């Protein structure tokens, strides 16, 4: 297992970008695909697309993001790629239901975006968890799930 302690830079850093360009031409850039929720973690174990078993250990002030470089040397680089975040689009039945829905998702600390009269909830885990929590509101016809994607 390869222990990666900290973030050494970002793919947009000019010095790192030049080195990555060279390594890409030699097939020496590995990627670890992370779910957006994993960017909150300070310790995690992942496998790169090349099969390298990695243990990532971050300092308290570090946070992974798309393009974080965890290792770069003359032989290879390991770069973080974020999996695309999915959103559940909810439509409240009326103004009263909208207030209740907003209060409900706020208490759960779900990440949201406002989309006109609809509410978009970030799916940062198993979709069934979100559906189960919303089931009472859906059954009472206070809201409906318009789309997931």
Image (cartoon, rainbow, N blue to C red):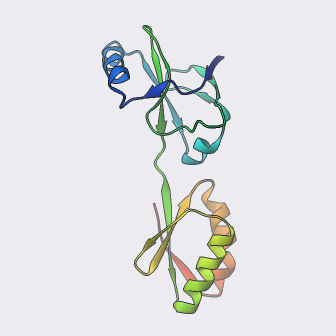
Identify the residue shown where x is 52% and y is 88%: 93
Looking at the rendering, which quadrant does residue 53 occupy? Answer: top right
Is 117 located above or below residue 11 in the figure?
below
Position of residue 120 measured from the top left corner of the image (x, y, whole percent): 49, 68
- Image position of 88 (left or right of 54): left
Comparing 46 with 42, the one in front is 42
Does residue 138 appear in the picture of this structure? no
Does residue 93 appear in the picture of this structure? yes
Position of residue 13 measured from the top left corner of the image (x, y, whole percent): 37, 28
Q: Which residue lies furthest to the front in this view?
A: 61
Quarter holding the C terminus is bottom left
- Image position of 11 (left or right of 103): left
Is 3 located above or below residue 85 in the figure?
above
Identify the residue shown where x is 59% and y is 78%: 102
Q: Which residue lies furthest to the top in this view?
A: 74
Is 142 located above or below residue 47 in the figure?
below
Position of residue 31 measured from the top left corner of the image (x, y, whole percent): 47, 28
Comparing 78 with 64, the one in front is 64
Position of residue 123 measured from the top left corner of the image (x, y, whole percent): 56, 58
Quarter holding the N terminus is top right
Identify the residue shown where x is 52% and y is 91%: 95
Identify the residue shown where x is 65% and y is 64%: 109
* Tally of numbered tags: 0
């Amino acid at each position: 297992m390869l222990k990666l302690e900290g973030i050494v830079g970002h793919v947009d850093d000019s010095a790192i970008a030049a080195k990555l360009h060279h390594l890409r031409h030699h097939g020496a850039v590995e990627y670890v695909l992370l779910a957006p929720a994993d960017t909150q973690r300070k310790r995690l174990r992942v496998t790169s697309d090349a099969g390298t078993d990695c243990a990532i250990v971050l300092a308290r002030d570090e946070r992974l993001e798309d393009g974080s470089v965890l290792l770069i040397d003359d032989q290879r680089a390991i770069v973080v790629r974020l999996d695309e975040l999915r959103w559940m689009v909810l439509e409240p039945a009326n103004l009263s239901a909208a207030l209740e829905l907003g209060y409900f998702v706020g208490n759960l600390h779900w990440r949201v975006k406002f989309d006109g009269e609809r509410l978009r909830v970030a799916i940062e885990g198993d979709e069934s968890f979100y559906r189960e929590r919303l089931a009472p509101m859906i059954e009472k016809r206070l809201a409906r799930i318009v789309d997931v994607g």
